[in-house]
Amino acid sequence: MKHKTYHIHCAKCNQYVLTYHKKGAGKGILRLYLANIFEPKELTNLHRSNFQRVNDVPNLTCPACEEVLGVPALSKGQKWVFRMRQGYFHRKLKK
Ligand SMILES: [Zn+2]
């Protein structure tokens, strides 16, 4: 399946947070699927953690300033996502 690659940065301190493979149409990133995080390893490993409850999943935070960029939720398809806080992150399309 085709995807676009985005680099996600913290809007507050501009720290690089993760690389994301976004599938499907739509420009915004409202829900970030854990399974589609490409880097870094600490975050790609989350997908393999077999979380049972939403309280088990950590928030997505900036590694530098610890701002919360996204909070965990289950998608309609029963997949773990981060519901992204709009305005708290920047996305840059990798070309
Ligand atoms: Zn930050």
Image (cartoon, grey):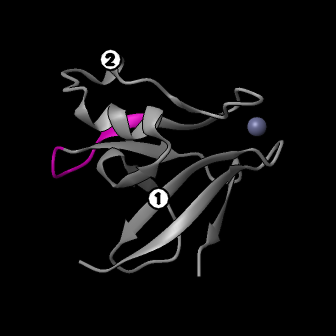
The disc labelled 1 sits on which kind of residue? Tyr
Q: Position of residue 13 (x, y in %)?
A: 83, 42
Taking the magenta stretch, the answer to whether it contains residue 15 is: no
| Residue at 30% over, 24% down | 54
Of tags 2 and 1, the one toward the viewer is 1
Disc 1 within 8 angstroms of ligand 1 (CB)? no
Residue 85 shown left or right of residue 25 in the figure = right
Q: Residues within 10 Å of mark 2 (few under 14, many from 20)?
A: few
Q: Residues within 10 Å of mark 1 (few under 14, many from 20)?
A: many
The residue most toward the front is: 41
| Residue at 46% over, 32% down | 42
| Residue at 60% over, 61% down | 7
Residue 25 shown left or right of residue 70 in the figure = left
Relative height, residue 74 to residue 64 (above, below): below
Residue position for label 1: 20
Residue position for label 2: 56
* Quarter of the displayed picture in which ligand 1 can be seen: top right
Q: Nearer the viewer, residue 61 or 42?
A: 42
Tag 1, which secondary structure? strand
The disc labelled 2 sits on which kind of residue? Asp
Residue 80 shown left or right of residue 8 in the figure = left
Q: Position of residue 84 (x, y in %)?
A: 53, 47
**Gap in Å between the C-alphas at discs 2 and 1?**
22 Å
